[in-house]
Amino acid sequence: MKKTTFILALPLLLAACSSNNADADFQKQLKQVAELGTVEGKINKVFALNDEDYSWLGNRTEIYECKATVKAGIDMDKFNSEKVNTDGDKITIELPEPEIFSYNITPDEIREIFSDIGTLRSNFSEKEREDVFQAAEVEIKGDEDIRNSILKEAKESAKTFFEVLLRQNGYNTININFEN
Amino acid sequence: MTKGIVKKVILAACAIAIIIGYACYAKFFKKSTTEMVSISQSIEEMKKISEFCTANYFQGVMVMDSMPGILLGYNKIVMTANGQIRAGFDLSQMETESVGDTLKITLQPAKILDTIVNPSGFKTITESGSWSHQRTTKLKNKARGEIAKLAVNDGVLTAAKENGIKLLTAMFSSFGFDNVEITVNQKQ
């Protein structure tokens, strides 16, 4: 009897063990922010998924092109209103240094542009592609030259934004500085 | 003479069998190391924007897809997606009018600025069968859509609107405007 119960319960036990509850436990969060985006940059990256093992059995290569959208600007949460000086139609403000707010790589913007999988080789699994796409994302986010170019542009753009806004609203002499 | 030919044929057959066997082993069982080879990376374009993101929403979903297997049953893929929704105002459509020390601001409704689920946000939980990049891209887009829907249902746009009004009022007050009146249009 005990044996029969155990056999009947076994599939249920196995199912319970195989479901990954930790992964399904998502943390929902709603956060208030004050991110004034002043520049949007598009980064283009071309990379290959390559498998050199067993190359004598045939090629196993795919090439992808991906585009990442980067947004940067001023975090107005860090803006100190005490660093604003007004005198008649003159205004001086000090803004925080620009920051990168987001990198966005949408699934549609990762396009396969070349594929060479030999007959004796298997297709890339989603897990393999996932690892490689994640490595590409890390490289995009870690590119200091690109980051600096976008931040430089964000600074100029923020300056223009505030100059136009303040001029439209009665200020004629506008000085915009950035915190060091 | 015949014996020699038979011996050679058997040897050749054995060699072919070994190669085919190893190929099958490599194709179906042996894990190989896939690596990412970077070919190029550059900035394609840059443009000025005036977006004020006032609410960030983080959420995860689980999505799955299935298709008939080659022989029997179904092939299945299950993945989780953890993403971010950025919501706020497009300030390029903001209208301002100063009357004395009062500043009147009209904004278009708060909207979703970005739905972000980067490759690092996806995790394949189970995968059976062979899934094309095009098919998994569709599944990933479904996950993005679900996260955006949850964000709207959980009030991200209301939070973005309320926080945006509060922040813009404080910002313009610090620029010397004693009275700041903000109106948000109902429909775009």
Image (cartoon, rainbow, N blue to C red):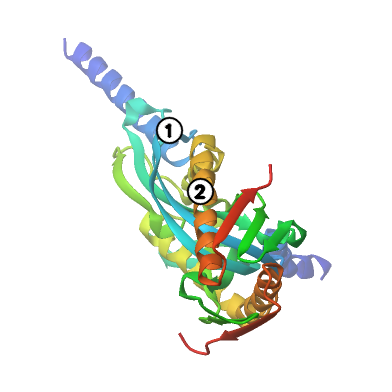
Q: Which disc is residue B37 wearing?
A: 1
Where disc 1 sits, the SS reads strand
- Residue B124 visible from this viewpoint: no
Q: Amino acid at mark 2?
A: Glu
Q: Is residue A58 above or below residue B118?
A: above
Residue at the farthest front position: A88
Residue B133 on image: x %, y %: 39, 54
The residue lying at 52 percent from left, 90 percent from top is: B186
**Quarter containing the N terminus of chain B:** top left
Q: CA distance from mark 1 to mark 2?
A: 14 Å
The residue lying at 50 percent from left, 57 percent from top is: A160
Q: Is residue B53 above or below residue A146?
A: below
Q: Amino acid at mark 1?
A: Val
In screen coordinates, is A107 left or right of B122? left
- Residue A157 visible from this viewpoint: yes
Residue at the farthest left position: B1
Query: Front-most of B52 and A90?
Result: A90
Q: Identify the chain of the residue marked 2, using the numbered disc in the image.
A: A
**Are the two marked residues, 1 and 2, in contact with CB atoms closer than 8 angstroms?**
no
**Residue that carries the numbered disc 2 in the rendered image:** A130
